[in-house]
Image (cartoon, rainbow, N blue to C red):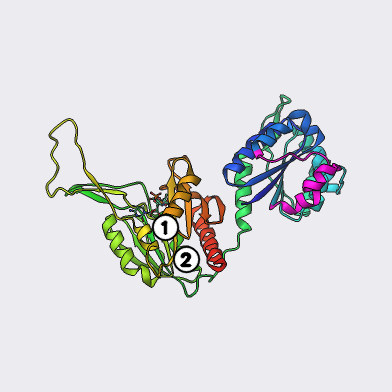
Amino acid sequence: MKHILLGVSGGIAAYKAAELVRLLRKQGAEVRVVMTQSALEFISSLTFQALSGNPVHTELLDTEAENAMGHISLARWADVLIIAPATANTLAKLSCGLADDLLSTLYLAATCPVYVAPAMNQAMWSKVVTQENIARLIRQGVHIIGPEIGDQACGETGLGRMSEPMTICNQLVLALQDQVTFSELGLQGHRVLISAGPTREPLDPVRYLTNRSSGKMGYAIAAAAIKAGADVTLVSGPVELTAPANVNLINVTTAEQMYQAVMSSALEHTIYIGTAAVADYSPIVSDKKIKKDGNSLTLILQKTKDILAAVSALEQRPFTVGFAAETHDLERYARDKLTQKKLDMIAANWVGQEQGGFDSEQNALQVFWDKGDKALLMTDKGQLAEQLIDLIIERIKAR
Ligand code: PMT
């Protein structure tokens, strides 16, 4: 789980920082908040405590806080420091290296990447001294997000509005992804079997039941496994994608065909990753087109074979990674599947939401194993697949 330290300084945009905490936590990050004294005039520390689920830090010299998590340990804890809003005064202090409160001291002590999202009146922003401070911060390696043009709380219009929390959140997600080191060739010598895409269960000669899986997640995992040096077999349901070069592609249509293809080669592989959205039930196929006879039609569906459970039940089974697509109670259902199907790992994702899951370019995963878990934040499926492969390599080594 990524650690984000959020510094809030005293400006009217401080209320937007509350939304930022919510968005970052939604991405699976752990957030701790540091507030300056003037920030406390704008928004209560209780708001941040409730949203972050952690105590809020406000004092530099607080014996109790130093015992629990002092300024040096807080700085070490952070994977990234973001100051939003960053007032003109805070920027001036940071650029000169002043350390007269907790936030400015943290900035000096931090070795992680630092981002600031300035927010101030447009005249203050365009003042030469502010621009010199910004230039000095950039030279110190600080990343600046915004500000943006728009209506300001003071009634003026111009450059100085803090960027929207979503914009800041997206930049931080990208920054954290850059810190991920993809283990090139960490799968050399491994043979990886991946199932991808939907299955199609025929009803009659002209109709079938299927789902919204595009295959993008599974194909991205296949590409990442190849990049990591593995020999890859991809058992794919019907999708409109081109398989990555050097993949041994087996095309199937139904859940039964996918079961046969996976089971006939599972023992030749060292890792199985079940990304496919396999039909849980399939209809009894009519050999003639079903006629439109009544106002309603009842279909009788039969349970399909559980491919993932069958692979993990093999005596010499590969390292078995399942997926879980959930609309609610994600952790509970994912952990149930991990235990019931005796998996080594399960990657759970939300489906039926605005972002991520079926047929989207992006996704986020919450990965669970018996004694741990890791959040892989929302990103494009290519990046996410590399992060998942990294984690699989790490878990195989830890066994
Ligand atoms: O293909 P995309 O558009 O890129 O979308 C990606 C995805 C959302 C399909 C993918 O990330 C995902 O969540 N795949 C699993 C979908 C699913 O069927 O989840 P489930 O919770 O119903 O199944 C749990 C696990 O059992 C899965 O690993 C599934 O492959 C496996 N299973 C299910 C039924 C069955 N008969 N056999 C199985 O092996």
Which residue lies under the disc numbered 2?
A: 225
Q: Amino acid at mark 2?
A: Ala
The front one of 108 and 348 is: 348
Q: Is residue 361 visible in this depiction of the protein? A: no
Q: Which residues are magenta?
A: 52-79
Q: Residues within 10 Å of mark 1 (few under 14, many from 20)?
A: many
Q: Looking at numbered disc 1 in the image, what kind of residue is underneath it?
A: Gly
Q: Quadrant of residue 316?
A: bottom left
Identify which residue is drawn at 32% across, 56% down.
Answer: 237
Label at residue 165:
none
Q: Position of residue 141 (x, y in %)?
A: 75, 54
Q: Which mark is residue 218?
A: 1
Q: Residue at x 66, y 39 (%)?
A: 52
Does label 1 point to a residue whose CB lies under 8 Å from ligand 1? yes
Q: Are marks 2 and 1 in contact (CB under 8 Å)?
A: no
| Direction from residue 57 to residue 349 in the image, left or right | left
Residue 167 vertical placement versus 346 (above, below): above
Question: SS at mark 2?
Answer: helix
Task: Say how many tags the image has.
Answer: 2
Where residue 123 sits in the image (x, y, percent)? 78, 33
| Front residue of 94 and 249 | 249
> Where in the figure is residue 282, as x and y percent of width and height?
25, 49
Mark 1: secondary structure:
helix
Whether residue 62 appears in magenta in the rendering, the answer is yes
Q: Which badge, 2 or 1, is on the more N-terminal residue? A: 1
Mark 2 surroundings: few (<14), some (14-19) or many (≥20) residues within 10 A: many
